[in-house]
Image: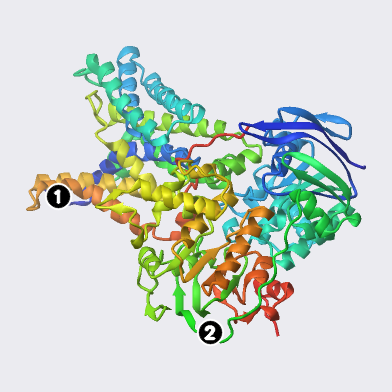
Amino acid sequence: MATDLRISNISKIYPGCVANDNVSLQFKSGKIYALLGENGAGKSTLVKILSGVISPDNGEVFLNEKNLKLSSPLDAKKNKIGMVFQHFNLFETLSVFENLSIDATEDNKSLRVRINEILKKYNFNIELDVPVLNLSAGQKQKVEIIRCLLRSPKVLIMDEPTSVLTEQETEELFISLKKFCGEGILIIYITHKLKEVLSLCDEVAVMRKGKVVSVSHTQNERVETLANKMVGQKLAKIKKKINISKNKDEIFKVKHLNFYSDDPFETNLVNLNFSVKKGECLGIAGISGNGQNELFQILSGEIITPDTSIIFRNKEIAKLNPKQRREYLMAFSPEDRISQAAVPELKIYENVALNNFKSSNFFEKGLVNEKKIKEHSKKILSDFSVNTDNVELKSQFLSGGNLQKLILGRELITAPELLICYNPTWGLDVGAINYIHETLIKINDQEKSTILISTDTEELLKLSDRIAVIYKGKLSKIMPSEEVTPEKLGVLMGGGSID
Amino acid sequence: MSLDISFIGILIGSIMASSVPLILAASGELITERSGVLNLGVEGMMIIGAISGFALMVITDNLFIAILGSMLSGVIISLIFGFLTQSLLTNHVATGLALTIFGIGLSAMLGKNFVGIPGKEFPILFLSLRESIPFFGPILFGHSIVLYFAFALPFLTNYFLKKTKLGLVVRAVGDSPVSASNQGINVILVRYCCILYGGAMCGLAGAYLSLIYTPQWIENMTAGRGWIALALVVFATWSPIKVLIGALIFGGITILQLHMQAIGFRIPVQFLSALPYLMTIIVLVVISRDSRKIKLNTPTSLGRIFYKEK
């Protein structure tokens, strides 16, 4: 039976922000719909309303002309609306089977049979009795999809599903989604990745600032047209940088980096060796959870590993802590902006003072020199075009993009010789990403070096001079970026080997 | 004093009896914590259970009502905690501490008129078997029904958590309340139930002290057992069977060191009194070294406030 989902005049207002402003859309089964928009455009709010997690202030949802009352996730489930969230809704310490059985109405035996049928039908390869925390992101997503399929959904909503996947996994996902679509499931695909919209979806609705600004067939669209609709202004294209640093000195050299952990959430690192030249950007690709966290922490000095040698500007720094490393002009931008890079409850200027560098005179005789810090913070805010000049603002009120600019600004104002960043544009919108990328390129232009640990292959190809891939704690050989293609990276990131 | 076989049997029997309140309170708290709620009010709930059980016994002269009443009073006082932490979203740690202080104060006030009243003898099961079988008799028989229940409880708890649907739901809520809520599980309700169950078990643990173990009411008679129970749960890494082992070690060394003091070992008394705490922690740390298992058993959301998006 054909499915027809209609959203009518949905509004949702949060204090100080209109998340959804009179949104009306119509979806029919047999097609894959894209919901495209930047971060904060209101996509997530809309799908949370559709899945019953939050209720709208206004408006209605109709499924096959039946007015749905979606006041809890249970209502969505009952009405056969399945949802795969961007941040997985799985129980990490429970086994795959337990995760799937928790809301099942049948007994375990017949459930297992049904799960195995689904595994076979869609060629999913997942062990049912291991804890979910042992699975890769792609496998976790499959568990989520299976959970939806078990309820034979009419509508399947995917929220930014490829942000954690490799190229291969993404392709597999697309094949599955097309299969589901062929079986009559209506698919709504939320993303901010333009290429995915064009290669997968039939129709695309673009959202901006809570409103639907356009609905069109994807065959009539190109990357540029969609990008302009999404951002609302013309985007300047960043040029890919020319590799200029072939015969430069090595400024940073890591030897015998080994890390062993008992913690099942951590990845062991096995004999990593690499070096960075002056003015160069070394990219380290990989799917998250393959040791990037540990690598970043070791490079920044949060974890000290024995027997590792780290030479920076001709000095051995392997035993130094992060503060001492900063004094040698290293700078760090961790992945988790909220909990690692900045303290959200503190004001902007307090966060700026946190990585107190020697030359700054921020602290005198143990007291805080507020005036100096504030002046300094104002300079960062204006130099890095953060959209506020109020240094008293609590950092938690900055958007992800602005917070990242603040952090980069804080790190760069010391003119470091080496910046190590981990997923600097994670979760940011196109405008902010562009700005961060420009900044990173500028650093290299000034003969300073960067190490870019990222899960975004496009970003790596754009910014890096040389790229290596980390997989299960091992580093591939380091390749000049002009020899690297997204496909090659995808193979290596998935644990395959090239040539 | 002769260390013959029958004496050892009696000794083991008394060790078992002394660990009952720990097993009960810790098993109850374990379920509460597995759902992600950290209730530091164990001591308070136990002492309320102790006084209400004893008072009801004196008033009604019915042990059954007394036991039931003690559990009910544990439920009621834990309901305060539940309401504050789950409905009003207060901090678990502060609320739990307040509950303990409140419980100790309230019990002292309620118990004023019950000091010095002799308790009633609690029925003991299989008394004839206890006398007739050497060694195993005093270990296996001649105990109150509550003791048998307490020793079955860790196994029942383990079965509940690992094998039943409800146990799975409790673990899921403790792992990720947000995911559970998105799956349509009523997180607040589950947590309320676990808190109330924990309250009931703590109340029973208190009643065991005032009705069975030392049948009388003394102010502050739980004497820190609630805190030991809390520590047992953590050091046993949320595993019911390890809670049982820990409680037995603690009870065992408490009794043994009393005997050692009586015999007059040349070891400072203070050290002997500290021994149970020390040994319990050491043993539990040693048997729970597997960091992988710890990760899998630890309720990830423990002590964190959960509120539903609207």
Q: Is residue A336 above or below residue A474?
A: above
Would you call the spot at circle 2 few (<14 residues within 10 Å), some (14-19), or many (20 or more)? few
Badge 2 amino acid: Lys
Q: Position of residue A38 (x, y in %)?
A: 71, 49
Total marks placed: 2
Along the line of sight, the residue nearer the viewer: A161 or A194: A194
Location of the N terminus of chain A by quadrant is: top right
Along the line of sight, the residue nearer the viewer: B161 or A49: A49
B191 horizontally vs A46: left or right? left
Location of the C terminus of chain A by quadrant is: bottom right
Residue A207 is drawn in which quadrant? top right
Name the residue tied to disc 2.
A248
A62 horizontally vs A363: left or right? right
Q: Secondary structure at mark 1?
A: helix
Q: Is residue B75 above or below residue A47?
A: above
Badge 1 amino acid: Phe
Q: Chain of mark 2?
A: A
Name the residue tied to disc 1.
B271
Is residue B211 visible in this depiction of the protein? no
Q: Position of residue A453 (x, y in %)?
A: 57, 67
Is residue A448 visible in this depiction of the protein? yes
Q: Which mark is residue A57?
A: none
Q: Residue at x 21, y 44 (%)?
A: B255
